[in-house]
Amino acid sequence: MTADKTDLPLSGVLVLDMCQFLSGPYCSLRLQDLGARVIKIERPGLGDLSRRLYLSDTEIGGDSTIFHAINRSKESLALDMKDPNDLAALKRLIGKADVVLQNFRPGVIKRIGLDYETLKKDFPGLVYGSITGYGDEGPWVSRPGQDLLAQARSGVMWLNGDADQGPVPFGLAIADMLAGAALAQGVLAALVRQGRTGKGAHVETSLLEAMIDFQFEVLTTHLNDGERPPKRSSFRSAHAYLSAPYGVYQTADGWLTLAMMPIDQLADVLKLEDLAPYRGKPDLWFTARDDIKRIIARHLATETTDHWLSILEPADVWCARVLDWPELMHHAGFKVLDMLQTVTREDGVSIRTTRSPLRVDGKRMQTDRAAPKIGEQTAAIRAEFGL
């Protein structure tokens, strides 16, 4: 079912997004999926730098697919912050907003005069969200706050891949997305207080803080077991801290994942006698996990994925077929979620993309407007707000 935007929790909330690239715009995307109106502030002629951040040679309507994906259904107001008249207009618009978001490098926003401490004097109820690369102080403050660089500094690369691979980054912009999601949580909490007391707030996070929080489970283990470094498996590693059989295994015609379970149970279900030396010895399930996983891998390679699922699933063994994107898109389990939509623009640009991951009262938000052209709504917004 599709939700009416006027019925969504943030209907009537105005968000001004002064951010570029992914982290801040991901936050405003989540807020607009919950019903907020998002006005994106862009530089005339240039716009958000992510308009030219190409994942491939695919370009839609002159902009990258990244820009379209993360800015769907937003409005674009083109203003030059170096122009006194445009800056004054932006300050007037801020006075009408509920939320302002920015991800400038530390110090830049203050020089412009749009930092929280300056704005709250005139707008004490404003909810103001900031994302930086590494916080506002320390030796990394002036370093570029980019996703891969944040991953590199966070330690997360030593959790991926096999033991002999060196540091392995995630193939997604996880620092950007997680920081945006964290900021959205903080902004929502601040809006709750704003609604109760009228008091605003400055909600801050950074790519590095989001990456540290992302690792809270394994970091807690590390901090309380003598600070031993993570030890990845040398064979089919899927988690540096989990014992065999946790991993991904090749079958005769595909791939299968096995999650955590007693080796005794798996040996019984698979009738795998070679696992007998490891029965009832949980300490070996970690220290000898590579040997155990190789035994399992040899066995699973002899039959198809369907064959193994027909044995493992009825025995309540935690397992799953590894799907690629085409297989996912055609699977009933994906289709029932109704997670895709097509959005369009007045100039005929059309793009197929994802929908909000949230359902409110059983209904999922859907929009029909694609990401805007630079300044597409400038004239209308100026007229509406008297700018």
Image (cartoon, rainbow, N blue to C red):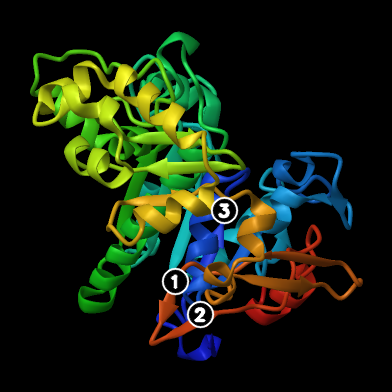
Residue positioned 29% across, 64% down in the render: 190
Q: Which mark is residue 358?
A: 1
Compared to residue 141, the image places residue 129 above or below, namely below
Q: Which mark is residue 364?
A: 2
Q: Which mark is residue 50?
A: none
Dot 3 falls on a residue whose secondary structure is helix
Give residue 234's quadrant in the image: top left
Q: Give how far across and how far down residue 358 sits, in percent.
A: 44, 71
Gap between marks 2 and 1, in whole Å? 6 Å
Residue at far right of view: 347
Q: Give how far across and how far down residue 305 sits, in percent.
A: 52, 48
Residue positioned 9% across, 14% down in the render: 226
Q: Amino acid at mark 2?
A: Arg
Gap between marks 2 and 3, in whole Å? 20 Å
Q: Kindly report which numbered mark, 2 or 3, lies closer to the viewer in this rendering.
A: 2
Q: Is residue 101 visible?
A: yes
Query: Contact (CB < 8 A) between labels 2 and 1?
Result: yes
Which circle's residue, 2 or 3, is located before the other in the chain?
A: 3
Q: Which mark is residue 25?
A: 3
Q: Is residue 121 visible?
A: no
Q: Amino acid at mark 1?
A: Leu
- Residue 374 appears left or right of 23: right
Q: Kindly report which numbered mark, 3 or 1, lies closer to the viewer in this rendering.
A: 1
Q: Give how far across and how far down residue 294 sits, in percent.
A: 39, 22
Dot 1 falls on a residue whose secondary structure is loop
Residue positioned 19% across, 27% down in the render: 276
Query: Contact (CB < 8 A) between labels 2 and 3?
Result: no
Q: Residues within 10 Å of mark 1 (few under 14, many from 20)?
A: some
> From the image, which quarter does the C terminus lie in?
bottom right
- Residue 51 appears left or right of 338: right
